[in-house]
Image (cartoon, rainbow, N blue to C red):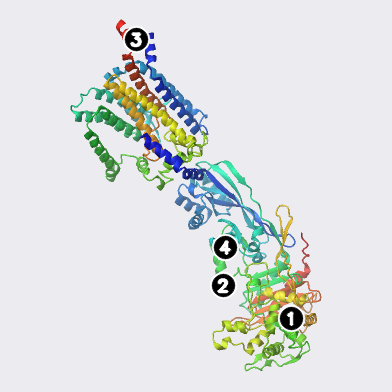
């Protein structure tokens, strides 16, 4: 029975999706290698690549059980998941390690865990679970408010770590899922007004009365993309160097490991936030388009899964994972080319970072699970197996 | 949304890519200029007058400065250059985006170690490199001949002479450094280096070695030069000792009368060319430009213009004979006063009956007043003609910049410059004054040396020069001969020249004007004093001579501004020079 079940599951696995994700992961590791292999302070040229590969393997191993369990069961674990998410995030405040002025990581000895990454996936499940149980067209205001309330708790915790980027992803996630669920457009308008008001409050009003919720560098980063050439050595430096890197890559790039911006360290954080700039410089427009093509493929598979999901919960989970990936993709790349503020959001599957890799692969695992489930329902052998059981 | 990203990428990587490629190169490619050492300047005995030493230059690459204001401020303190000057220098080089700008090229060892310790952390964009600097092994010897070097100015860059020079080039600003700049100047090399974000060089992309400039050998003899400078300074002291306290400037030139080779050229006061190396201190600049400094940069031998006074009399004598106004035997009587004209003209003594030889030997003014007046009555410009034939009123063609031409006054000149009707008229007094080298005539000491060289060598007008030849700095092979070939034989009677020469010999013997100084001198000297009256000043003292009188090897001209006595101050100065000359006569220049 188990054997048949396993065969059935494997049969309905979305291999195309997995292959595209794997391709992006490998592409990313090549770029990380290029960005870091010449760093004399590292124990070896493959130091970051190895850690990234380990995280990828861990993530892939988690995909298999995720795909095999009935994801629908997760719907009932909303509260434990939510509490887990909150506890993990709170833990950062208690035992978290600090780097560059922010406390985002928990040192687990072998590696550093960044809970905010797992929070994103967790919140996809929590919000999908909540929204799937809400009757359509009734008490929509309550639906929206509860969704935002669910979101705001971990969001604020993460915001004050501070991890502005991840907080932003959570917000985007909540809005996207409300949109997929289908609340009235007036809600989005109201949220927009509230957001602008909140930003004004945080950036302009509160500092005047002496309350500085955002660190000065975060404000700088946020505002500098509007005029990066103004101060090329200060806060706009990173952005300027990133644009120089990408622009000078031209159509075909300078060649792998040949990017002067990346190899000579003009490019900051070139294996994490600005890994796309390495791609743009060394492999050019064409190299960037290859990544885009892979991403478009992943998104297409994701949308397909969302549409064929066997339940509203499944659709919402698929939509949540998709919007999480897409949002990070746009904001990260937009940041490197100067059309989005610098927020510290990484490029999914490409940027160096174990927690983010595992979390994003977990998201893929959920997609696979939904895919397998929805396909098996239509499979005769599966039905027969159920009947004989 | 994908489309937005793709359009933006297309814009960055295809449409605007060239700009970003340039910016990326600007980030990591640094062109480091390797300044070529200039050629060495030797004296005629191959003793170096100007060499090079290895200096250390501080360079600033403005785009790499992390905090320009703080860095410039602190760098200025560290290297003892006012921050404002560093800013101005960076401003001047603002268009030179790939290159580092030299802000100081002569670091002391202490400054160097201070900077090297702090550069990586506190001074990103600041660097130190080797820089060849001018060195003067013989101090300020021959400073006016050598000139000095400095960074090319914006004005100079616009000059067609410097069409193939560029910003930051070091050029000769004066003297030989200026005159022979195209030989002395090397070809700068450059290194293109790839640097990382911290400014550390990673690899060399391209390197062109600097080609050193070519050496220039001069006719100057260092020993004679030093003796001449010492004699001139001593002459000024002597003037002070004799009560002429206003004496504060002078010139002396020592030349070969046969070919115009200048053995020594001294001008007082002088300067230290080493002060230009590594940027002149404000103190020294003030010292040079102070009103009492009396223009130390002026080379009085070629650019000082003075009335020749009695040293001009041989020219009047030759003119008189050539134009048949007088013969060597013509007699005039000197009673001490000549009152043919409404205003009496005096002689410094009363000489009785005077012929030409005696007139020159004893420097009788009244003899020459008569000659001048005869020219006036004949309505002749003979004196002016012969003055010009002997090269007065025109450039000697010496191979040094800034030569003055002097002035030979004639009716046309008076007409042109006179302000009133009377001023514009050529009066008998003008001819009379001119005959003894007074009035409006002006000459340079070098012009007078050239006149006496022509008297000494049988009427050949030489072109004075300091350049001998150009040599390859590496191989020593002669590349060019700098000696002029345009010695000109004047159409002048040798017998008449002989009369003048005889007068000049007698002038330096007992009974002559400089007999006190030269009667006991060996070899025999032929020479003439001159005491120039300048309105409002103590008299200027001249002495022009050649020796040995029968086979002239050397001509010397000495002028001491406000030196008072030509016989008591200028002649002894010339003697000291001649003593030094004959103690170690310069070897003939047989280089090549």
Q: CB under 8 Å between callouts 2 and 3? A: no
Position in image of residue A6 (x %, y %): 38, 12
Q: Is residue A43 above or below residue B409?
A: above
Position in image of residue B151 (x %, y %): 57, 58
Quadrant of residue A368 within the rendered picture: top left
Position in image of residue A272 (x %, y %): 43, 33
Q: Quadrant of the N terminus of chain B?
A: top left
Residue A381 badge: 3
Judging by the rendered image, the residue that carries numbered circle 1 is B514
Residue A292 shows up from this direction: yes
Label 4 packing within 10 angstroms: few (<14), some (14-19), many (20+) = few
How much space separates mark 3 and mark 1, taking CA atoms? 138 Å
How much space separates mark 2 and mark 3, taking CA atoms? 116 Å
Quadrant of residue B500 within the rendered picture: bottom right
Judging by the rendered image, the residue that carries numbered circle 2 is B292
* Camera-side mark, 4 or 3: 3
**Circle 1 SS class:** loop
How much space separates mark 4 and mark 3, taking CA atoms? 95 Å
Q: Earlier in the sequence, mark 1 or mark 2?
A: 2
Would residue A328 appear left or right of A80 to someone viewing this image? right
Q: CB under 8 Å between callouts 4 and 3? A: no
Label 3 packing within 10 angstroms: few (<14), some (14-19), many (20+) = some
State the residue lying farthest toward the left.
A138
* Camera-side mark, 2 or 4: 4
């Amino acid at each position: 029975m188990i054997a048949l079940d396993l065969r059935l599951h494997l049969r309905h696995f979305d291999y195309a999706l997995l292959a595209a994700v794997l391709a992006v992961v490998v592409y990313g590791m090549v770029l990380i290698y290029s960005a870091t292999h010449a760093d004399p302070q590292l124990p070896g040229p493959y130091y970051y690549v190895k850690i990234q590969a380990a995280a990828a393997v861990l993530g892939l191993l988690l995909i298999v059980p995720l795909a095999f369990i009935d994801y629908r069961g997760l719907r009932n674990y909303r509260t434990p998941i939510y509490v887990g998410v909150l506890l993990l995030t709170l833990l950062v405040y208690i035992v978290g390690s600090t780097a560059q002025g922010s406390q985002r990581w928990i040192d687990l000895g072998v590696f550093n865990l960044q809970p905010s990454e797992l929070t994103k996936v967790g919140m996809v499940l929590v919000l999908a679970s909540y929204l799937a149980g809400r009757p359509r067209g009734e008490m929509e205001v309550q639906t929206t408010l509860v969704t935002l309330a669910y979101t705001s708790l971990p969001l604020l915790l993460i915001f004050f770590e501070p991890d502005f980027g991840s907080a932003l992803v959570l917000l985007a996630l909540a809005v996207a899922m409300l949109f997929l669920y289908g609340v009235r457009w007036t809600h989005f308008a109201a949220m927009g007004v509230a957001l602008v008001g909140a930003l004004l409050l945080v950036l302009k009003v509160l500092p005047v009365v002496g309350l500085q919720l955002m660190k000065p560098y975060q404000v700088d980063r946020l505002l500098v993309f509007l005029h990066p050439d103004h101060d090329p050595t200060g806060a706009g430096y990173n952005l300027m160097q990133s644009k120089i890197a990408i622009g000078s890559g031209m159509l075909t790039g300078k060649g792998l490991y040949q990017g002067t911006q990346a190899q000579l360290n003009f490019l900051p954080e070139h294996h994490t936030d600005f890994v796309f700039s390495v791609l743009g410089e060394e492999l050019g427009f064409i190299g960037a388009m290859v990544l885009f093509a892979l991403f478009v493929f992943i998104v297409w598979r994701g949308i397909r899964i969302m549409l064929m999901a066997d339940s509203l919960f499944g659709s919402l989970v698929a939509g949540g994972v998709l919007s999480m990936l897409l949002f990070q993709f746009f904001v990260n790349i937009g940041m490197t080319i100067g059309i989005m503020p610098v927020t510290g959001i990484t490029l999914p599957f490409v940027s160096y970072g174990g927690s983010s890799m595992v979390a994003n692969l977990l998201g893929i695992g959920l997609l696979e699970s939904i895919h397998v489930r929805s396909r098996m329902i239509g499979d005769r052998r599966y039905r027969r197996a159920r009947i004989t059981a | 949304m994908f489309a937005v990203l793709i359009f933006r990428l297309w814009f960055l990587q295809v449409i605007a890519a060239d700009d970003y490629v340039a910016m990326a190169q600007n980030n990591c490619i640094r062109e480091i200029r390797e300044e070529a050492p200039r050629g060495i300047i030797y004296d005629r005995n191959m003793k170096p007058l100007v060499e090079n030493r290895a200096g250390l230059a501080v360079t600033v690459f403005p785009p790499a400065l992390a905090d320009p204001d703080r860095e410039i401020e602190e760098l200025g303190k560290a290297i003892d250059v006012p921050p404002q000057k560093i800013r101005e220098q960076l401003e001047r080089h603002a268009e030179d985006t790939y290159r580092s700008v030299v802000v100081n090229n002569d670091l002391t060892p202490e400054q160097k170690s201070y900077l090297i310790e702090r550069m990586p952390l506190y001074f990103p964009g600041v660097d130190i490199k080797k820089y060849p600097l001018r060195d003067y092994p013989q101090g300020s010897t021959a400073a006016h001949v050598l000139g000095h070097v400095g960074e090319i100015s914006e004005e100079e860059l616009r000059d067609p002479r410097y069409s193939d020079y560029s910003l930051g080039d070091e050029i000769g600003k004066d003297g030989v450094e200026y005159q022979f700049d195209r030989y002395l100047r090397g070809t700068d090399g450059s290194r293109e280096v790839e640097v990382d974000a911290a400014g550390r060089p990673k690899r060399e992309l391209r390197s062109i070695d600097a080609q050193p400039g070519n050496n220039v050998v001069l006719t100057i003899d260092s020993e004679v030069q030093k003796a001449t400078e010492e004699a001139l300074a001593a002459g000024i002291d002597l003037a002070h000792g004799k009560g002429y306290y206003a004496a504060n400037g002078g010139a002396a030139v020592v030349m070969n009368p046969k070919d115009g080779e200048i053995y020594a050229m001294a001008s007082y006061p002088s300067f230290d060319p080493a002060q230009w190396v590594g940027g002149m201190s404000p103190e020294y600049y003030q010292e040079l430009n102070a009103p009492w400094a009396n223009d130390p940069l002026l080379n009085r031998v070629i650019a000082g213009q003075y009335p020749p006074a009695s040293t001009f009399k041989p020219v009047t004598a030759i003119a008189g004979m050539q134009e048949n106004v007088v013969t060597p035997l013509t007699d005039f009587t000197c009673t001490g006063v000549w009152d043919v004209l409404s205003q009496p003209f005096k002689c410094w003594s009363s000489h009785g009956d005077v012929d030409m030889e005696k007139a020159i030997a004893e420097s009788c003014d009244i003899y020459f007043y008569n000659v001048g007046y005869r020219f006036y009555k004949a309505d002749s410009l003979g004196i002016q003609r012969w003055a010009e034939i002997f090269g007065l009123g025109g450039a000697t063609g010496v191979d040094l910049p800034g030569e003055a031409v002097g002035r030979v006054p004639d009716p046309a000149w008076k007409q042109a410059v006179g302000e009133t009707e009377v001023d514009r008229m050529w009066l008998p007094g003008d001819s009379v004054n001119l005959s003894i080298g007074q009035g409006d005539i002006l000459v340079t000491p070098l012009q007078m040396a050239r006149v006496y060289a022509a008297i000494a060598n049988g009427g050949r007008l030489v072109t004075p020069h300091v350049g001998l030849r150009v040599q390859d700095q590496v191989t020593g092979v002669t590349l060019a001969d700098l000696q002029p070939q345009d010695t000109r034989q004047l159409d002048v009677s040798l017998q008449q020249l002989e009369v003048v020469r005889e007068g000049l010999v007698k002038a330096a013997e007992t009974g002559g004007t400089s007999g006190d100084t030269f009667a006991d001198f060996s070899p025999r000297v032929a020479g003439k004093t001159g005491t120039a009256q300048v309105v409002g000043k103590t008299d200027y003292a001249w002495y022009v001579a050649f020796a040995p009188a029968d086979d002239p090897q050397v001509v010397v001209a000495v002028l001491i501004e406000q030196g008072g006595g030509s016989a008591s101050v200028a002649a002894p100065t010339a003697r000291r020079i001649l003593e030094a000359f004959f103690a170690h006569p310069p070897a003939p220049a047989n280089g090549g």
